[in-house]
Amino acid sequence: MKENLIVRERLMESLEQGMKGRMTTVCAPAGSGKSTLIGQWAQSARIRTAWVSLDERDNDIARFWRYVINAYMEAGPPALSDSLSAALALVAGTTVNVIMDTLLNELAAVQEQIALVLDDYHHVELAAIHNSLSCFIEYLPAHHRIIIASRETIAFDAAKWLARGERTDIGMQQLHFTQEETREFCRSAGIHLEQRQTNKLFEKTEGWVAGLQLASISLQAQQDIDRMIARFDGSHETVSLYLFQEVLDKLPSDLKDFLLQTSVFDRMDSEVCNRAFNRSDSREMLERLRALNLFVIPLDDHNGWFRYHSLFAEFLRNRLRSRSRQLWLDYHHAASVAFADRGLLDKAIDHAIAGERYKEAAERLEDYIQDALKQGELASLLERLQTVSEHIPLSARLLLYQSFAYFLTGQMFFAAETVEKLERKYEQPEYASELEPLQGGMLFLQSNLLFYTGRYVQWDSFVGYRLHGVLPEDPVFYSFNYNRIEPLVRRTAFGLKGTLSADTERIGQRFTAVLEQHGWGQSLINLYVVQAMCEGYYEWNRQSDSLLLVRKIEQSDRARQTAGLFVPSRITLARLHAAAGQFQKAHDAIEEAVRMAERLGEYHWLYPLRASLAHLYLKENNLAEAKAEISKLHLSDRIQPASSRWSEYTVYARILTAQGKTAEAIRQLELIKSAVEQEHCFLVLTEIDVVQALAEYQRGNRSAALQLVHAALLVGEANGYIRSFVDEGSQMKKLLHAYMEKRQREAGTDAMEDVSLSYVAKLLECFPEQEPPLLPAASLVEPLTEQESYILQLLDQGAPNKQIAAKLALTEGTVKVYLSRIYAKLGVSSRTQALAAARQLNGWRNSGRIGSGERI
């Protein structure tokens, strides 16, 4: 529709008022002028507007958030567009929490106000989208806003924002024209009515915007206006049908034909219209329709893509179907061919299905698989496969793809059920030629289903009698990227989320041997198995085995082009170097991964890499550099972190603990723990428990520390974890000694007996005999004050905090603040380290003060 008509100041003011809160809803039936109102406001407001027009095909969570991110990239300042490229890269193959966390953090860094408009939200039915959007709104940075336009009440609970005064609602009654607006509307449309006629028109249409719009078109050519208005009786649906019929019947035949042809499109541009219907005048036709104000809505700022108003489109489609069902089907087929020629396979498939060309839809689905996997739109893929399968049997190849999609979405039951259908086909000789090329892919899926469901004995026998060098030739299987966000492969489902056992090692070795024996050594599936084993060996403290596999990964050109492999490989190498005290080599390994991520433009990998650098600095007792590195991550205290941020938040908590801010460290750990608990990742939960135990131990909460370390040991023993404990250094060694003493003291009555003391003893044996010496820092960033130097002397005399407080007439809390400052200035994290550092200062004991130019 044209956006001339009138500017409705009262509604514009309501939208402006809504900008003071978190969200605005505009909910009313079709034809109420929702989109027009918001569009008028967006043009006049001094706020950037990110606009997403939704339809029923957008019930795919990956697609939905891709559209949202793209809208922000188009509407926001250039810096936001650049930074959101990382969030866009996360859409495929990751969880929605990760996407939202990245998006929210990037929006928080933009000071300019942006309003996100979700138009036609009533098309969204997927509960996962409703839930994710509700979470997004809850954590939306204070200077950003969201507007939702829907025919129905929004489908998620938004009462809390109304109670807080952060939500504005504009409903049907507010959208209806007043009598005065009706008069102004008629004047602006060039319709000259008497006052009584205007009043009657208002009464008949009840201020319904679409009815007035249709009436304005019809009345312009009417001689008997009173008779025309008198016929506006009945429901909105009845009135619109009558008025649409009036409008269509008066159009030239070429426009009528064009409207009926193009009614099958949800979205269109002139090129697809020309291709579908062998035309050359589609641009001209669309412009003529717009000039006539005939419900043609532009979908971009360039007048490239359009759609018809939903009421008008529904009327046209019903008219076409009633005229000729065959034309309806043929037009959809033409649209399918046109979109396929443009390379828009998803739309081509949908039109083929609507045109009941199911064989054609199936053929296009085979070509679409790669795109669907790359974009992460597995829900839409499975829905289309299911729809086609209800009408024709799926080919063996499509059944294989369907099983793989179920497998990737964690629907193991349906994946196995689909594989069983293929197995039954194998038993029928007439399918032999069709199935032979797919044998490798089927065996690949069967093998993985057995492995990921923990049926290791069955896997052994399966490989023994089925996997005779027959591997899938289809790159869908061997080139799939199993890791797009995790700094360690062991953290992914592919890495069994931290599970380690003799079975996983044996199967991993056998699997890679088969792949490499048949020339598949450089396939992503093989390289990911190698990396997962590499990380497992490091955890088991088999460092030479781990290093051997690190070298194997780094020699692979394929791995160097795949950040999901190379980043975990460099982090593992850095850990190996750090364990050997070779910190410069560890830094070099991380920096190599940083350069690779920047070269590939995959900037989201910089977050875990910077966290790894901060962790290295902390191990070197360089607290200042650790703080500087972690500050680059802009970790938010307000936003619920995504589970993928575990490495950043655990390092952050370590740094806070080193500063003496143990309460804040524990709070950050609880935040990330709540994000990862539902994923049951042993690896991450163990690390969080370990770091939290050390924080509790440092602040003197011995009981809580022992309980937490017990929880970590319980998982650790089941999986043979060693480095998760040893890498934490001398404080963990002390805590484990305390744990051992408690267990020995309470033998026989101990509730912690589900962890063996032999395992704890084994861990203690793996710690170095002496704590590594502190590496000298160049100089103090800031000198200690006289008070701080005196406190350091009291520490050297063994005085506890209570005694220091009494001596200086301070509270114990103030003493803790002083100690935190001293630790930060010395670049240490404990009393022992502070005294060791201070003793290296020239004349400290005699001078009573450490100057800024004296070296540690």
Image (cartoon, rainbow, N blue to C red):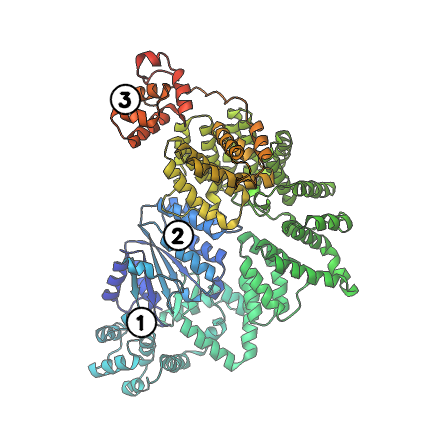
Looking at the rendered structure, the secondary structure element under dot 3 is: helix
> Residue 641: horizontal and vertical position, in percent?
42, 46
Q: Which dot, 3 or 1, sits closer to the camera? A: 3
> In this picture, is 835 found above or below 677?
above
Sequence-first disc among 3 and 1: 1
> Residue 404: horizontal and vertical position, in percent?
62, 55
> Residue 463: horizontal and vertical position, in percent?
74, 48
Looking at the rendered structure, the secondary structure element under dot 2 is: helix
Of residue 348 and residue 18, the one placed in the foreground of this image is 18
Horizontal relation, residue 54 to residue 579: left or right: left
* Label 1 CA crowd tier, 10 Å (few <14, some 14–19, many 20+): some
> Residue 621: horizontal and vertical position, in percent?
44, 26
Sequence-first disc among 3 and 2: 2
Of residue 550 and residue 539, the one placed in the foreground of this image is 539
Q: How many marks?
A: 3
Q: Are marks 3 and 1 in contact (CB under 8 Å)?
A: no
| Kind of residue at disc 1 | Met
Residue 787 is marked as 3
Residue 172 is marked as 1
Q: How far apart are the alpha carbons under marks 3 and 2?
A: 52 Å
Q: Which residue is mark 2?
A: 72
Q: Are marks 2 and 1 in contact (CB under 8 Å)?
A: no
Q: Residue at x 64, y 45 (%)?
A: 525
